[in-house]
Image (cartoon, rainbow, N blue to C red):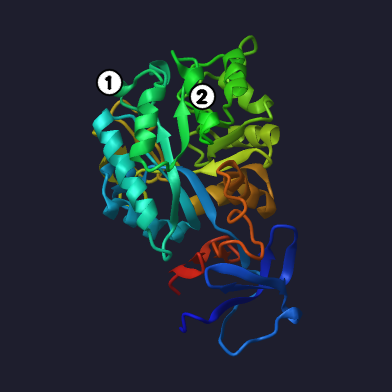
């Protein structure tokens, strides 16, 4: 196909930023969305490459996964360009067009290696794959009481100076940090993150409800994987969970695999938080898209079966959830609409990461990061910045 031609996805339902077009079309030119309209408005140009489908097919903005460690035997902590390339090439299969390469609690040397690698990769990446739009630093500034699958031996108190060194190593690309603000110097780091336009996320935290309030005052605006790795809800101490439900300042991540939290708890969270503040994540490991077996997570063996990844002691260790399955599960568990899904997978993460001027919705002038779903909500095609990155085999 001529590189100067436009791609037209024709006769589909388009979930654009401001309306849903039942018999619509969308035009992609030079990495951008250049036209959206109803099919009777389309005027064919000589170099247009038309993909004609049917209105049962739905076009939505590509998902932005703000919390993902690995996929397809690659992990951000591998510290290699090849690992990030594997992640970027695989994720369009599940409808993800952008992501934050997510680190985990390890030695300072291992974390710094992963950060340097990701920073370099971000500056040199190509357009044909899912885009690494930044780094999510998960740990080591967390609570030993809420370690989960994060190795306790490498947990340390929040440290502004160390974070500054790491941000320099990452080329300024750390966009989100999971920390426990109740730990010594936690509020100081939270404030610093806010000052430098990095999202401070409360996670792996034993904070009380009031301590979360203090963290919000200091600049926290996000909750890492709701329910998991946090002080839960009690009628005399609402904890981190209660704050996630009640504080409108917070965007809230949720893993909707039905394992990290039961379907009923997904519905409870959705009913309380709504699609205005929820962000769907996968928190997936290198074992995603691989067969059952034993894999590595931060030097720990992780046992994977059809649905679940656990440490030897049974602790949940991330997920093997695909974003497309997160979408289907969430709709099933909550009865939400596809418009709500678009908010939770694209709009909200784009707004939280300050990317909404270029990503997160289908609008003329934005990046051509789009996903075509069939009538069963399976991914048929994914375009990353206007390039066809995945097409389902017939």
Quarter of image, res 138? top left
Quarter of image, res 100? top left
Nearer to me, 371 or 312? 371
Q: Which residue is mark 1?
A: 153
* Residue found at x 31% / y 43%: 116
Disc 1 or disc 2, which is closer to the eye? Answer: 2
285 left or right, relative to 365 = left
- Helix, strand or loop status at disc 1: helix
- Helix, strand or loop status at disc 2: helix
Residue at the top extreme, as displayed: 236
Q: Which residue is mark 2?
A: 190
- Quarter of the image that includes the C terminus: bottom left
How far from the left and from the top, in percent, is residue 356?
61, 51
How far from the left and from the top, in percent, is residue 173?
42, 43
Nearer to me, 346 or 137? 137
Quarter of image, res 270? top right
303 left or right, relative to 210 = left
Q: How far apart are the two marked residues, 1 and 2, measured between alpha carbons?
A: 23 Å
Number of marks in picture: 2
Q: Residues within 10 Å of mark 2 (few under 14, many from 20)?
A: many
Nearer to me, 87 or 34? 34
The numbered dot on residue 197 is none
Does residue 141 show up?
no
* Residue found at x 39% / y 56%: 88
In the picture shown, does residue 182 fall above or below 65?
above
225 left or right, relative to 115 = right
Q: Earlier in the sequence, mark 1 or mark 2?
A: 1
* Residue found at x 24% / y 32%: 109
How far from the left and from the top, in percent, is residue 333?
61, 43
């Amino acid at each position: 196909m001529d590189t100067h031609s436009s791609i037209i996805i024709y006769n589909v339902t388009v979930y654009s930023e401001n309306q849903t077009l039942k018999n619509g079309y969308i035009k992609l030119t030079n990495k951008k969305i250049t036209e959206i309209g109803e099919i009777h408005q389309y005027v064919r140009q000589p170099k247009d490459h038309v993909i004609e489908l049917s209105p049962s097919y739905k076009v939505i903005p590509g998902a932005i996964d703000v919390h993902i460690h690995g996929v397809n035997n690659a992990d951000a902590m591998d510290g290699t360009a090849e690992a990030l390339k594997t992640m970027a090439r695989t994720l369009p299969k599940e409808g993800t067009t952008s992501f934050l390469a997510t680190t985990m609690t390890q030695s300072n040397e291992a974390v710094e290696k992963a950060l340097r690698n990701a920073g370099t990769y971000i500056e040199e990446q190509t357009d044909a794959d899912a885009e690494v739009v930044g780094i999510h630093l998960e740990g080591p500034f967390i609570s030993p009481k809420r370690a989960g699958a994060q190795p306790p031996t490498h947990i340390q108190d929040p440290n502004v100076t160390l974070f500054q060194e790491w941000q320099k190593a990452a080329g300024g690309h750390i966009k989100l940090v999971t920390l426990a603000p109740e730990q010594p110097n936690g509020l100081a780091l939270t404030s610093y993150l806010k000052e430098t336009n990095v999202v401070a996320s409360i996670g792996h935290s034993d904070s009380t409800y009031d301590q979360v309030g203090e963290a919000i005052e200091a600049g926290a605006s996000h909750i890492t994987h709701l329910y998991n790795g946090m002080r839960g809800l009690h009628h005399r101490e609402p904890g981190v969970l209660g704050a996630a439900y009640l504080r409108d300042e917070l965007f809230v991540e949720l893993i909707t695999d039905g394992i990290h939290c039961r379907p009923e708890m997904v519905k409870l969270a959705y009913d309380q938080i709504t699609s205005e503040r929820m962000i769907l994540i996968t928190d997936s490991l290198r074992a995603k898209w691989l067969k059952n077996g034993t894999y590595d997570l931060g030097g720990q063996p992780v046992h994977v079966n059809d649905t679940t990844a656990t440490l030897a002691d049974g602790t949940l260790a991330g997920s093997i959830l695909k974003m497309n399955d997160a979408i289907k599960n969430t709709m099933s568990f909550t009865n939400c609409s596809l418009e709500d899904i678009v908010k939770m997978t694209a709009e909200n993460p784009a707004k939280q990461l300050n990317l909404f001027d270029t990503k997160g919705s289908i609008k003329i002038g934005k990046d051509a990061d789009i996903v075509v779903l069939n009538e069963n909500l399976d991914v048929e095609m994914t375009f990353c910045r206007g390039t066809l990155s995945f097409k389902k085999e017939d």
